[in-house]
Image (tube, rainbow, N blue to C red):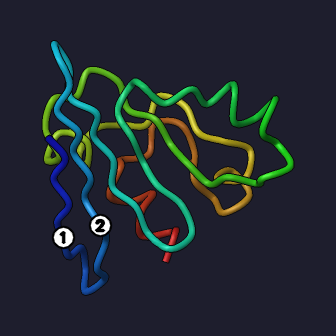
Amino acid sequence: MIDLSPIEINGHTFLVVSVLLPKTTLLAVTSDKGYIMCGALDVGLLNEKLKDRKIIAGRAVGVRTIDQLLNAPLESVTLEAEELGIHEGMLGKEALLKMV
């Protein structure tokens, strides 16, 4: 099952994506510029093999809900995210606000 729903953070609207899979749920929150995602995101792949796409993204591990994803410190971020001032340890919702 896939669930898509809007969420507002400090007056900005983002899209929440939840994909229910056997034994796991993929979680992501996206803006027009980038996104944060659960531990399934491979930041190394984005930075290395897909570098030319200049993807702005951050990864939080150990999260099971969207609320946890928004309030968790990012474990890793892409090089393009760093260019926007997004860094490891930043809360997911803080990173999203830099993506508007």
Residue 15 circle label: 2
Along the horizontal axis of the image, is 21 left or right of 90? left
Q: Residues within 10 Å of mark 1 (few under 14, many from 20)?
A: some
Q: Looking at the image, which residue is at 68% across and 25% down? A: 44
Q: In which quarter of the image is residue 24?
A: top left
Q: Where is residue 12 in the image (x, y as percent from the top left)?
A: 31, 82
Residue 29 circle label: none
Disc 1 target residue: 7
Along the horizontal axis of the image, is 26 left or right of 1? right
Most distant residue in the bottom direction? 11
Q: Looking at the image, which residue is at 81% across and 29% down? A: 48
Q: Position of residue 4 (x, y in %)?
A: 20, 60
Q: What residue type is labelled 2?
A: Leu
Q: Looking at the image, which residue is at 55% across and 31% down? A: 76
**Vertical comparison of 33 with 28: above or below:** below
Identify the secondary structure beneath mark 1: strand
**Vertical comparison of 71 with 38: above or below:** below
CB contact under 8 Å: marks 2 and 1: yes
Identify the secondary structure beneath mark 2: strand
Q: Quadrant of residue 90?
A: top left
Rounded to the nearest angstrom, the CA distance separating label 2 from label 1 is 6 Å
Q: What residue type is labelled 1?
A: Ile
Image quadrant where one finds the N terminus: top left
Q: Position of residue 32 (x, y in %)?
A: 50, 74
Along the horizontal axis of the image, is 13 left or right of 78? left
